Image: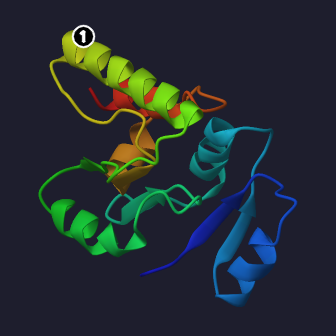
């Protein structure tokens, strides 16, 4: 069953109104931070082992058009991660870009796998989601996901 679920961190903008208008289901997260949003989802959503799930950051930094590719790859793999396509270079972005490269390199050195660890787009099979033990509360979520899968 195809469904869009928005885990909202009590945003002050029109996210909820627009999402409801477009037919999305809304879940309000417990606490603050991206990791808490994911923890709320794991705790409150009835995850089915044989279903496929896509996590996509809501800031439009990843194309929703890639979801069919993720779903196709999830037929073969239990987890699929996205890769950013292009970065706008402002000082803040350059620092994030370099930091992400360093974190991804450390992940490679520790686990022998190189991926964009800080990606905001992931695909999971339900059985994998059900087994995850996520403790991240904020933007450390992606590192926590990476550690959980290896």
Quadrant (top left/top right/bottom left/bottom right) for the N terminus:
bottom left
As displayed, is residue 103 above or below residue 62?
above
Name the residue: 75% across, 70% down: 15
Q: Quadrant of residue 115?
A: top left
Q: Which one is in front, 84 or 78? A: 84
The x, y position of residue 85, in whole percent, is 32, 54
Name the residue: 22% across, 68% down: 69
The x, y position of residue 73, in whole percent, is 17, 61
The x, y position of residue 109, in whole percent, is 21, 11
The answer to whether residue 138 is visible is: yes
- As drawn, is 114 to the left or to the right of 14? left
Quadrant (top left/top right/bottom left/bottom right) for the C terminus:
top left
- Point out the residue furthest to the left here: 76
Name the residue: 26% across, 18% down: 105
The answer to whether residue 133 is visible is: no
- As drawn, is 97 to the left or to the right of 71? right
Dot 1 alpha-carbon crowd within 10 angstroms: few under 14, some 14 to 19, many 20 or more: few
For mark 1, what is the residue? 110
As displayed, is residue 134 above or below residue 64?
above
Q: Which one is in front, 99 or 133? A: 99
């Amino acid at each position: 069953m195809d469904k869009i679920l928005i885990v909202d961190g009590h945003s002050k903008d029109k996210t909820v109104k627009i999402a409801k208008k477009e037919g999305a289901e809304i879940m309000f997260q417990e606490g603050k931070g991206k990791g808490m949003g994911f923890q709320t989802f794991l705790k409150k959503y009835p995850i089915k082992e044989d279903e496929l799930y896509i996590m996509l950051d809501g800031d439009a930094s990843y194309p929703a058009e890639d979801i069919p590719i993720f779903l196709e790859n999830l037929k073969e793999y239990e987890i699929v991660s996205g890769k950013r396509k292009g970065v706008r270079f402002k000082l803040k972005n350059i620092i994030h870009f370099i930091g992400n490269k360093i974190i991804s390199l450390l992940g490679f050195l520790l686990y022998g796998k190189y991926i964009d660890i800080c990606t905001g787009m992931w695909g999971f099979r339900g059985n994998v989601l059900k087994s995850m033990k996520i403790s991240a509360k904020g933007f450390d979520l992606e590192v926590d996901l990476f550690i959980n899968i290896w």
